[in-house]
Amino acid sequence: MNTGNEPLYIIPARYRKMENMHIVFWLLKDISWCLIWKILGIAMIFPTLIISIIIAWRTRQLKSELAHNLAITFWISANSLWMISEFFGFDTMPVGKYFEGKHLALIPFIIGILILAYYYAFQRSEDSKEELITM
């Protein structure tokens, strides 16, 4: 319950419906991965990823939301790459001296964590200052 002292973050209903559908697609993708339903799993990558990109775009004015939504987009990308590596059997194939195919998913995972690290190291303190000024 808002006591009137803290700022509100309001999401338009149509955006919220899209976010909820995003969760449905994401769950279908991961269930398909778990059950090795290759066609459905791969098909669910597209709506899941597209909606996460749209959500990130729509929240681009809010640094916190943008950072977290971009991290989610890279997480879905990494997760999808890992799923595909398992579906097509290159998850355990050597890639270099220390890595296997599934470790290619580390690239988008690391990009996502770097976005969040940058936000928390540099932008969050700016957001806090701006909140104090506007209150």
Image (tube, rainbow, N blue to C red):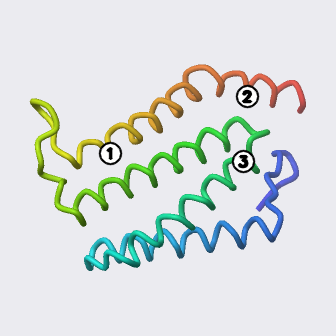
Q: Secondary structure at mark 1?
A: helix
Q: Nearer the viewer, residue 8 or 59?
A: 59
User: Quarter holding the N terminus?
Assistant: bottom right
* Disc 1 packing (10 Å; few <14; some 14–19; many ≥20): many
Residue at 46%, 55% in the rendered image: 76
How crowded is the residue under tag 3: few (<14 C-alpha within 10 Å), some, or many (20+)?
some
Q: Position of residue 15 (x, y in %)?
A: 76, 65
| Marks 1/3: CA–CA distance | 23 Å
Task: Find disc 3 in the rendering and name its residue.
Answer: 57
Q: Earlier in the sequence, mark 1 or mark 3?
A: 3
Q: Secondary structure at mark 3?
A: helix
Q: Nearer the viewer, residue 62 or 85?
A: 85
Residue plotted at (37% across, 77% down): 39
Amino acid of disc 3 = Trp
Q: Which residue is mark 1?
A: 105
Q: CA distance from mark 1 to mark 2?
A: 31 Å
Give amino acid for label 1: Ala
Tag 2 secondary structure: helix
Circle on res. 127: 2
